[in-house]
Amino acid sequence: MLRLLTIELQKIKYSKSAKALLIIYFGLFMFIALIASIKFNLGFVEFHLAEQGIFNFPYIWHFNTYIASFLKIFMAVIIVSMVANEYSNRTLKQNLIDGLSKKEFILSKFYTVILFALASTLFIFLVSFVLGLIFSSYTEFSIIFSDLEYLFAYFIKLVGFFAFCLFLGIWIKRSAFALGFLFVWWIAESIIIGVLKFVIFKDSLIANKISQFLPLESISNLVKQPFTRLNVVQASASQIGADVNWDSSVSILQLLIVCVWTGIFIFLSYKIIKRRDL
Amino acid sequence: MKTILSLQQLTKKFGALTAVDHVSFTIEKGHVYGILGPNGSGKSTTLGMVLNVVNKTSGNFYWFDKSYSTHRALKKVGAIIERPNFYPYMTAYQNLALVCKIKEVTEENIDKKLELVGLLERKNDKFSTYSLGMKQRLAIASALLNDPEILILDEPTNGLDPQGIHQIREIIKKIASTGTTILLASHLLDEVEKVCSHVIILRKGKMLYAGSVDKLNASFGYVELKAENHEDLLSIVQNHSWFTAEKVDPENHIITANLTENIAADALNKMFVEKGIFLSHLIKRKESLEEQFLQLTNQ
């Protein structure tokens, strides 16, 4: 396993574009800290976002993992191109001739993807931890380390999404087309969900029960939007009488669905590469 | 004799096209093999199948004694297919270090192999800055990193300039002289003729011949003869049991005849002298591989 990981990391280590994207990706994590400095000046009312409780423990785990997951599109570019380049440089063929098995090839990519997800999770943990210590109203040990399941869900979410990107890269061979397909897929899922909701069932509850099994939908369901949990939002919603009882906790079923999709994507990648003449 | 690679009825179909049609042969340790065939005869597809990049349709092959899985066996093999494939953004050394990791060998061999192919002083330059000849030589260095049991070269001189072709040939000869088993696929006959002891001839995916170069054509070669008294010479050649299928070139009166036995040139000369004929021209030849190849593939 370590051998496969070092093989893949060496391929990335010397690639300038991959390195640049990685630096941008992890650099943008830091920018979450900048949210702290957002201040609206609504005439006579000054609105300081950091003081609205978004950086309170344990809410910060939820908020930051949700915000950070938008950055995963940068990783999608890296992952898709690290696969597509193997085709265009014909190094996939050479790797196999040199004695890497097709299974090892897929695994080396998959291990790397897990490492990326792990590094992202660790990074967001550190950033949130520091931000929390600075801005949180509560810094008791037990409060800081509660709700950590959001970090775990974030990790699984990234692994699932990266496995999907890996599969698209291996299937489609060209990075631009694979990324385009990712976008098309996303639109297709939105249409399917829309049709389920408004045409077939006319009931969003049943529709959600079905659509939660779609790959991108299940991935995005892992860390749901955290805004309705904010006191400000809750307060203003109850003023206008809206019901915002939105369950945004991490569900075991969703975790399972994403794990199954991850397995399917990796297995399909292997099947495709096994059947293909290179 | 230790078997390195064995193919049994190996077949590959691309849709309706049968690219490789029931090909069987065995590669044994210590020989230099050539796979000959015109473009599109299935050479690269055959190699692709045994090298794990093309899926076979039917038939079988196994490496060494059947106990090895293909990818494990390939760690003991060095192979280059068609074009040199490396990571363009890495230097030669970094590329070879990666191959070492894949093959699970130490990196200590890298400098030695780079020196063998004459690229040691360019080892820290990026692969993308290399000329085609240098890329091909780097590929050979890469294939040799694990001191392979067999070196497989597919069209190693394709697209190179004469100097590059010469360099590659010298390297191949050097490697062959160390006793490494080599399998060389080419459509260039003189290339194969110069280094190979055994040939496998393919045409349209079918195997026409597999065996030693010497036995390819069972004939004993042919002679070219000329003498002052042309008529006497011709009558001796026509009546002697050593000769068959004699032809006369009407312009320079050179007589060409196939030999029926293995007769040395000096014995021939002696026989003619005893019959009172002094030759002014005597050449004894084997058919070149090219002539034999054309005979076979034109059938």
Image (tube, coloured by chain):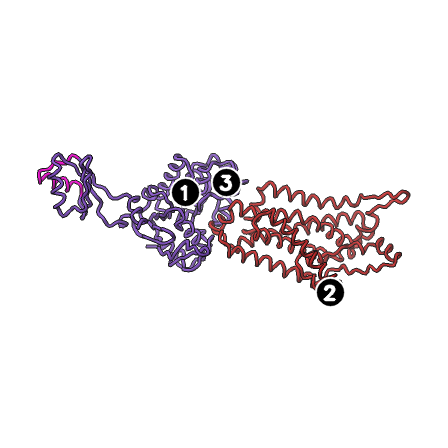
Residue appearing at x 44%, y 42% in the figure: B141
Seen from the viewer's position, the closer of residues B42 and B25 is B42
Residue B156's disc is 1
The residue marked by circle 1 belongs to what chain?
A: B
Could you say which quadrant of the image residue A143 lies in?
bottom right
Which color has been applied to chain B in this rendered view?
A: purple
Q: Between B68 and A91, which is closer to the camera in this rendering?
A: A91
Is B143 magenta? The answer is no
Q: Which chain is red?
A: A
Q: Amino acid at mark 2?
A: Phe
Q: How many marks?
A: 3
Q: Tell which tag, 3 or 2, sits nearer the viewer.
A: 2
Q: Is residue A53 left or right of residue B146?
A: right
Mark 2 lies on residue: A201
Q: Which mark is residue B107?
A: none
Residue A95 in the image: state x and y as whole percent. 50, 49
How far apart are the two marked residues, 3 and 2, measured between alpha carbons? 62 Å
Magenta span of residues: B264-280
Element at label 1: loop
Q: Is residue B149 visible?
A: no
**Front of the two marks 3 and 1:** 1
